[in-house]
C-alpha cells in the first residue's frame, strides 16, 4: 500500500502550537478543564497539544469508534463510558473530523450530562463528507476527502505510528 505524504512533522507541530494558543485564549489557565481524548486515534495529537497547554487541563479518555476499513459504519460503538463532566468545562480532542458523527454525538452527550462548556479540537478536518451538522471549534489542519494515516490515524489499526500524516488511495 502506497502512502503519500500530506503534512510533515514540522507542519503538524506548528499547527498544534497555533491551536494551543487559541484554546488557552478561550479557557484560560485557572479554571479546570477536562481534556477528553477520543481513543485510539487522538492520543498523538492530545499528547502534543496538552504539553503546550497550562496545567488546568485534566486528561480523561473515551474509547469510541465508527470505522471499519476505510468507511464509516454510520454508527458509533462506545467501548467505554463518558467521564463525569457535570458543571465542568470540557475540551473534546479527536484525530479527524470527517462525517461529524462521533464529534456531534460526544458533544451532545456531554451537554446532556450538564457540562458547563463543551469545545472540540481535531488534528485534521476533512471537507466533502460532513453528514452531520458539526464543526470543530479548533482545527490544526485541513484536507480534502482523503483517507488519512499517520500521527494516530490508521487503516485497520496500522500506520498510526507514522510521525507525519499521509493518505492512501483506496
Image (cartoon, helix red, strand yellow):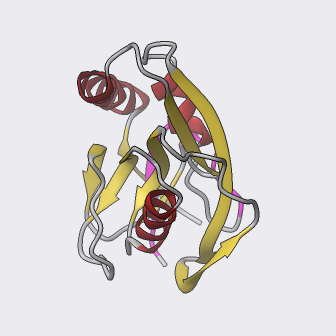
- Examine the structure image and report whether residue 167 is included in the region drawn in magenta: yes
| Residues rendered magenta in the picture | 157-169
Using the rendered view, name the quadrant where residue 107 is placed.
bottom left
- Examine the structure image and report whether residue 48 is included in the region drawn in magenta: no
Horizontal arrangement in the rendering, residue 9 relative to residue 28 (left or right): right
Q: Is residue 100 above or below residue 52?
A: below
Using the rendered view, name the quadrant where residue 66 is placed.
bottom right
Q: Is residue 54 above or below residue 137?
A: above
Residue at x 31% of width, y 29% of height: 23
Whether residue 86 is visible, yes or no, is: yes
The location of residue 54, given as percent across then percent down, is 44, 13
Residue at x 48% of width, y 54% of height: 114
Nearest to the observer: residue 26 or residue 98? 26
Residue at x 29% of width, y 31% of height: 19
The location of residue 149, given as percent across then percent down, is 52, 55
Using the rendered view, name the quadrant where residue 69 is placed.
bottom right
Amino acid at each position: 500500500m502506497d502512502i503519500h505524504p500530506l503534512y510533515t512533522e514540522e507542519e503538524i507541530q506548528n499547527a498544534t502550537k497555533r491551536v494551543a494558543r487559541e484554546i488557552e485564549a478561550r479557557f484560560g489557565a485557572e479554571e479546570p478543564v477536562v481534556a477528553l481524548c477520543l481513543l485510539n486515534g487522538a492520543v498523538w495529537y492530545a499528547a502534543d497539544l496538552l504539553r503546550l497547554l497550562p496545567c488546568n487541563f485534566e486528561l480523561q479518555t473515551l474509547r469510541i469508534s465508527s470505522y471499519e476499513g476505510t468507511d464509516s459504519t454510520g454508527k458509533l460503538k462506545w467501548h467505554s463510558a463518558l467521564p463525569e463532566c457535570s458543571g465542568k468545562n470540557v475540551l473534546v480532542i479527536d484525530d479527524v473530523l470527517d462525517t461529524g458523527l462521533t464529534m456531534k454525538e460526544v458533544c451532545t452527550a456531554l451537554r446532556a450530562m450538564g457540562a458547563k462548556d463543551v469545545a472540540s479540537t481535531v488534528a485534521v478536518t476533512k471537507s466533502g463528507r460532513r453528514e452531520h451538522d458539526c464543526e470543530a471549534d479548533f482545527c490544526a489542519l485541513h484536507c480534502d476527502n482523503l483517507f488519512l494515516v499517520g500521527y494516530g490515524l490508521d487503516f485497520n489499526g496500522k500506520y498510526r505510528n507514522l510521525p507525519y500524516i499521509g493518505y492512501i488511495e483506496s
